[in-house]
Amino acid sequence: MVSETNPTVLEKSENKQGRKVVLSIDDLHVWFELRRFGFGHAGYVKAVDGVTFDVHSAETIAVVGESGCGKSSLMKTILGLYKPTRGKITFEGKDLSGFGTEEMHRYHSHVGYVQQDPYGALPPFMNIHRILEEPLIVGGVKDKDERTRRVRTAMEEVKLTPVDDFLNKYPHMLSGGQQQRVVIARAMVMGPRFLVADEPVSMLDASVRVEILKLLRGLQESHNLSVIYITHDLSTVSYFSERIFVMYAGNLVEKGKVRQLIDNPLHPYTKALLTGTSEPDAKNAESFKEIPPGEPPSLVNPPTGCRFHPRCPFMMPGICDVDFPPDFEPEPGHLVSCWLYK
Ligand code: SF4
């Protein structure tokens, strides 16, 4: 029996084996106002349009979707760089919107950020020691010896060893994989409880992607980190994610445990994403090749009804193009926003 579910209620009632909720996203909307010309309202880019989920302690989740689906805006709002238009984000029970400068500083010390482009993320004029020391200085660690000790520990954890060989190097003197290890060390140096990893391997050579994913998984396990892994590539998520959320045009269209989603994808968009993916190697770089023709819709004027309907081979006229599909739950914990499962 398929049940229609209020996603907010379902997420809140989930018991992840007693693990407490660390981060809670509740009906999040992130809209950007378009520039006005003359009179009248130019509208909004609805980058995130009603997203709800929880992340538990030591849980890893993946948010998967094409570029332009809203996952970067979601990530930046979680990091406190954008303000929600509606809805809220709570970290360990506290609403981010109520944070002043001090609390936001403290929040950032708990949340590590691994960027997509390691070279662009590292200041070229600082050596590795200075880059890794910077968050500790900003975070108020006054003792220089203590800062050096923590820098060295972070470098050992990401396997930038022997440490003395790297401390005085500059980013351009490192390979792409080594630069990404510095980015990860910088995210870890404050001892975060939570990591946001934004496409952390997409700009690396295929040969080092697996090593970086293994490193992230090892850090997650040894530090009991909660992780949000943002990616366009479903072939890499089973590496260390417990649940997958598939995002399309500002909405989450399918949520479930990794095996549920990989073995039994429900949404036509997820099925298309999965075509041709298996292991994280170079062969699978084109994981979106089987997606039906067409472009992701405009986030200014998204299609009525299901936002995937202009590209969907199963579109039912009069239903899919008219009414927005709620979440249905064909199997426990596996939610899909598609009228096929009513
Ligand atoms: Fe396709 Fe309709 Fe399901 Fe949307 S609701 S994915 S258009 S079948």
Image (tube, grey):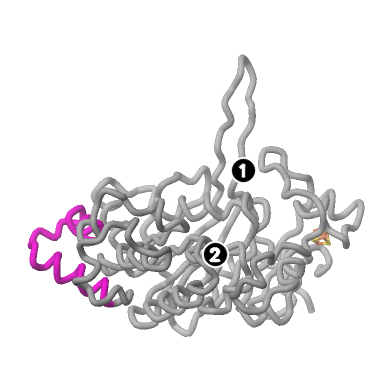
- Could you say which is closer to the camera, residue 73 or residue 319? 73
SS at circle 1? strand
Q: Which residues are magenta?
A: 131-156
- Could you say which is closer to the camera, residue 285 or residue 27? 285
261 left or right of 141?
Answer: right
* Residue 19 in the image, given as x and y percentages of width and height: 43, 79
Q: Residue at x 60, y 71 (%)?
A: 244
Q: Are marks 2 and 1 in contact (CB under 8 Å)?
A: no
Q: Is mark 1 within 8 Å of ligand 1?
A: no
Looking at the rendered image, the quarter that the N terminus falls into is: bottom right
Q: Residue at x 32, y 57 (%)?
A: 171
* Residue 44 in the image, given as x and y percentages of width and height: 61, 35
* Residue 91 in the image, given as x and y percentages of width and height: 38, 61
Q: Is mark 2 within 8 Å of ligand 1?
A: no
Looking at the rendered image, the quarter that the C terminus falls into is: bottom right
SS at circle 2? strand
